[in-house]
Amino acid sequence: MKLFRNAAMLVNGLLLAGMLGACENVNDNAPIPQTPTTASDRNAKTTQAVGQLIKDGNVSLTYNSQVPSALSKEIYDNGAFHEFSYGAQLISGKRFMTGFSNPTKEFSYTLDANGRCVQTVGDKTIIYEYDANGQLARYYNQQQPNERAVFTYKPDANGITNSLFAVTFYDASDKITKVLEFNYSLTQPIADKSPLNPDVFAKYVSKYLPIFGKFSGNLVQCSSEKKFVNGQKVSSVNYYHTYVLDYAGKVKNVTVKKYDGTLVSTTDRKYTIPNMAL
């Protein structure tokens, strides 16, 4: 038992050596990301993912019959749903609650000529700005510009692309309220073959609309969340993100745990099935 324990500690020590600040203070029980390539995964082409995402946890997704790539609805297990319609450089959204025939909320996304969102209107009007690489640099409340989120990127190992490293949130009084940090590699990166928007936006902003540029080509493997009150840090929590992949390399399940092993969430994903003969 002592030999096994020492070996496990050595492996975990090697894993942690190359991690960014987002993955600090990790205990010896931290899990390793899963990237299975079993025969059953490779051969299950009639039951596993290949196309568009149609289920993400408690959310089902449908797409426009005329434009198959355009998201039509987000339908929640409780019966509520979001409905989207498309115009020239504009996406309009409506939220319907169970038992109500009229929308309980309406919101919109204004796009630039490159298809990137430059403004959302919901509870607030939010303005989005992009850097020279076309990646989201910040967004802010049009009525109170100090209320904002600032995005920081770091170069990938290839020296060509950048990945989102941190998002820093400020309140209307220009004080930091939260910092999220992301790391994409413990032993090696895992390509993200069905990317979603990160959970860094207001509630009415869909994580399934690919209109905010590219944040990373890889899956997040660890992250941290630091919270602040009056500009002073009051808490810091670190997370591991592990994945089960299908034969095509798309995520079938994502599990998030705190570094002490406490389960935060586990989410199954499903995709369209290939149209092919058995």
Image: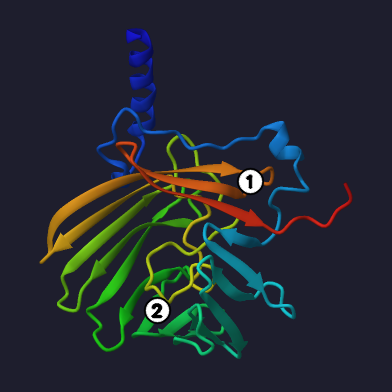
Q: In the image, what residue type sits under mark 2?
A: Tyr
Outermost residue to the right = 277
In the rendered view, would you say 108 is above or below 219? below
Quadrant the N terminus occupies: top left
Q: Residue at x 43, y 83 (%)?
A: 120
Where residue 204 appears, x then y in whole percent? Answer: 42, 77
The residue wearing badge 2 is: 128
Please say if the residues under marks 1 and 2 sit with CB atoms less than 8 Å apart.
no
Where residue 119 appears, x then y in whole percent? Answer: 43, 84
Which quadrant holds residue 179?
A: bottom left
Q: Residues within 10 Å of mark 1 (few under 14, many from 20)?
A: many
Q: Residue at x 51, y 64 (%)?
A: 214
In the rendered view, would you say 2 is above or below 246? above
Q: In the image, what residue type sits under mark 1?
A: Gly
Where residue 91 appears, x then y in whole percent? Answer: 55, 85
Outermost residue to the front = 99
The residue wearing badge 1 is: 249
Q: How crowded is mark 2: few (under 14 residues within 10 Å), some or many (20 or more)?
A: many
Q: Which of 78 and 94 is in front in this view?
A: 78
Which quadrant holds residue 221?
A: top left
Q: Residue at x 47, y 68 (%)?
A: 133
Where residue 8 appears, x then y in whole percent? Answer: 38, 20
Disc number placed over residue 237 in the picture, else none: none
